[in-house]
Image (cartoon, rainbow, N blue to C red):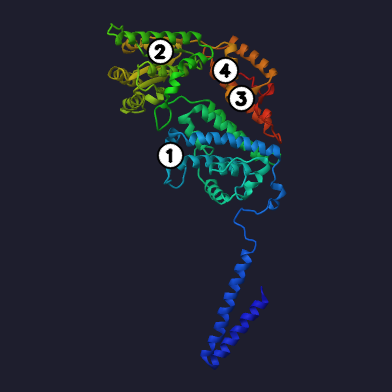
């Protein structure tokens, strides 16, 4: 307590009472003195507060930055590299109308946040949410820039239009006025509520799932690198940080298992749209596929046949009936969906269908649970596929039994195929024997599906090539010792495979196990080089039965 202040106010109070008792007009004298005193005090306080005043988060000299906030040159280079890579992804998204369209829907669907007046800003918001989620998961506070959240602020600064920094001037980031905006932005996104069923929902990855699945995987790898670098700012990794890094790796691994389309609640199909430039490269896409020589040959022969028949028609010559619908048979993981996408582009290029997109679905996307649902679901999927190709995986599962609604889906499909000639191509896929029995069970199916393409299992060398292709796609490398071990493992797997061997899916399982083991091996290391983050060793290969 300020006793001097108390005595002063007591003195003034007693004086006022005495003056009032003598003459009330004398009260004006202390009142004037009080006003003068208050004005003087305010003026002095204003001067004191403005002495050496600096805007929030703005320093006048780098010497004012605590030594603990300095970054080593090696650490800064790692931060800078991952932020550069994130900016490449950011610039792609900002300039993609398709990403923006999907992003606005994803933002409204999954984030409890205010409505944006400027829809174009949604893309930036989604990137900021993901970056904030990484730091929030690591337990890194957003208030005021420091070496732990330097990468977060640097990335946001770059999205605000800030330029690239070098190590020589990296401390300038501490002085940028935009930090006021950055802190306000981060405050919002640190408190944002993600999807309750998926607290690790990375918003940009969710959008890329609908736009570009390959780019989605690259983005998840980038987020893992980003979070890993921030976690190791102090050359240690806490249990919380290690657990969060493993969770990101798991999201990434789950993403590699691209689910069949037509399974979610909102849409009965996933749409793979292709540009004219992609159509021009379809022959290269087909040739670049690993193995599948017999399949490539049949697709090329079909393409040549259709081209010649169409040329005859243009010249007024008679044209023999052409069956565009196909049945793809073979074990899982043999590339049936991939070839279907390429064939859709071929059909578009040679004028069989106007759009060339692929809608992929299966029984769950076509068959309802109650009376009256099946025809509605099936027609909705077909409507999405018009102008392109409808790919039905494990189509034999539609057969069911006498009381099963799958037969209603078949009847609806056959009618629409007849009604939508020139607008719809259907490709059915599944195990060889099951598909033959399925087609033979219905005369309508027999009359419309007479072109079969068998997809053979991959041999050991092709499985190894598929593994190496995934390594390259996600910026991993394989040691020589690991490569020899893997070749032997694939040879053994092929020699003793069962009737339903998973092929490329089997390879993906091996790949995912390898990434998981590598993550567990590296998570506790205090500092990681790019080489270590990329390298898959023999120790990382999961040789358990798949």
Q: Earlier in the sequence, mark 1 or mark 3?
A: 1
Residue ID at (60%, 83%): 12
Q: In terms of secondary structure, where does tag 4 sit?
A: helix
> Does the residue at mark 2 contact the one at mark 1 (Cβ under 8 Å)?
no
Rendering coords of residue 231 (x, y %): 65, 39
Q: Does any portion of residue 86 appear in the rendered image? A: yes
Rendering coords of residue 451 (x, y %): 38, 9
The label on residue 466 is 4
Height in image: 362 above or below 185? Answer: above
> Does the residue at mark 3 contact the one at mark 4 (Cβ under 8 Å)?
no
Q: Which residue is mark 1?
A: 104
Q: Does any portion of residue 195 appear in the rendered image? A: no
Taking depth in this image into account, of 394 and 74 the one nearest to the observer is 74
Q: Nearer the viewer, mark 1 or mark 3?
A: 1
Taking depth in this image into account, of 206 and 342 the one nearest to the observer is 342
Q: Quadrant of the N terminus?
A: bottom right
Q: Earlier in the sequence, mark 2 or mark 1?
A: 1
Q: Nearer the viewer, mark 3 or mark 4?
A: 4
> Does the residue at mark 1 contact the one at mark 4 (Cβ under 8 Å)?
no
Q: Earlier in the sequence, mark 3 or mark 2?
A: 2
Residue ID at (66%, 36%): 77
Q: Earlier in the sequence, mark 2 or mark 4?
A: 2
The label on residue 327 is 2
> Does the residue at mark 3 contact the one at mark 2 (Cβ under 8 Å)?
no
- The crowd level at tag 4 (other Cα within 10 Å; few <14, some 14-19, many 20+) is many
- The crowd level at tag 3 (other Cα within 10 Å; few <14, some 14-19, many 20+) is some
Q: CA distance from mark 3 to mark 4?
A: 15 Å
Q: Earlier in the sequence, mark 1 or mark 4?
A: 1
Q: CA distance from mark 1 to mark 3?
A: 35 Å
Q: Is residue 167 left or right of residue 35?
A: right
The label on residue 513 is 3
Rendering coords of residue 171 (x, y %): 66, 46
């Amino acid at each position: 307590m300020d006793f001097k202040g108390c005595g002063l106010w007591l003195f003034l109070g007693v004086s006022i009472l005495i003056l009032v008792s003598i003459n009330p007009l004398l009260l004006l004298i202390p009142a004037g003195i009080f006003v003068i005193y208050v004005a003087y005090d305010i003026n002095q306080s204003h001067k004191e507060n403005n002495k050496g005043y600096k805007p929030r988060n703005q320093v006048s000299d780098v010497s004012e930055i605590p030594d603990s906030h300095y970054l080593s040159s090696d650490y800064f280079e790692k931060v800078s590299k991952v932020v550069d890579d994130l900016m490449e992804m950011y610039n792609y998204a900002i300039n993609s109308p398709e990403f923006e369209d999907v992003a606005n829907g994803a933002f409204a669907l999954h984030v409890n946040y205010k409505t944006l007046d400027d829809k174009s800003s949604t893309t930036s918001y989604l990137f900021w949410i993901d970056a904030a989620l990484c730091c929030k998961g690591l337990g890194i506070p957003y208030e005021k820039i420091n070496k732990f959240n330097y990468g977060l602020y640097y990335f946001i600064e770059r999205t605000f239009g800030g330029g690239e920094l070098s190590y020589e001037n990296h401390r300038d980031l501490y002085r940028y006025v935009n930090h006021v905006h950055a802190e306000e932005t981060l405050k919002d996104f640190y408190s944002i509520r993600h999807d309750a069923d998926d607290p690790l929902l990375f918003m940009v990855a969710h959008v890329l799932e609908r736009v570009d699945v390959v780019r989605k995987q690259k983005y998840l790898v980038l987020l893992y690198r980003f979070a890993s670098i921030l976690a190791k700012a102090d050359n240690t990794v806490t249990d919380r940080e290690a657990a969060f890094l493993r969770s990101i790796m798991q999201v990434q691994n789950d993403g590699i298992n691209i689910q069949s389309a037509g399974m979610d609640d909102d849409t009965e199909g996933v749409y793979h749209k292709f540009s004219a430039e992609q159509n021009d490269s379809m022959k290269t896409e087909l040739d670049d596929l690993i193995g599948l020589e017999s399949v490539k040959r049949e697709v090329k022969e079909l393409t040549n046949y259709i081209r010649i028949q169409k040329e005859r028609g243009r010249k007024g010559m008679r044209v023999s009936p052409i069956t565009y619908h196909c049945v793809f048979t073979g074990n899982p993981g043999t590339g049936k969906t991939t070839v279907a996408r390429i064939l859709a582009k071929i059909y578009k290029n040679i004028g069989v269908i106007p759009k060339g997109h692929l809608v992929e679905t299966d029984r769950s996307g076509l068959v309802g649970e109650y009376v009256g649902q099946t025809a509605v679901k099936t027609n909705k999927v077909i409507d999405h596929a018009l102008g392109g190709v409808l790919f039905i995986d494990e189509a034999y599962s539609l057969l069911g039994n006498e009381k099963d609604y799958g037969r209603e889906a078949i009847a609806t499909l056959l009618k629409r195929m007849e009604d939508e000639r020139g607008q719809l191509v259907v490709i059915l896929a599944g195990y060889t024997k099951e598909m033959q029995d399925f087609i033979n069970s219905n005369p309508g199916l027999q009359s419309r599906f007479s072109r079969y393409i068998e997809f053979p299992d991959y041999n050991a060398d092709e499985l190894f090539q598929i593994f190496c292709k995934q390594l390259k796609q996600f910026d991993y490398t394989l040691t020589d010792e690991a490569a020899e071990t893997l070749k032997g493992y694939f040879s053994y797997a092929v020699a003793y495979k069962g009737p339903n061997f998973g092929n490329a899916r089997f390879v993906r399982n091996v790949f995912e196990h390898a990434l998981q083991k590598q993550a567990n091996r590296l998570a506790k290391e205090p500092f990681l080089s790019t080489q270590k983050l990329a390298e898959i060793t023999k120790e990382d290969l999961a040789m358990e039965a798949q």
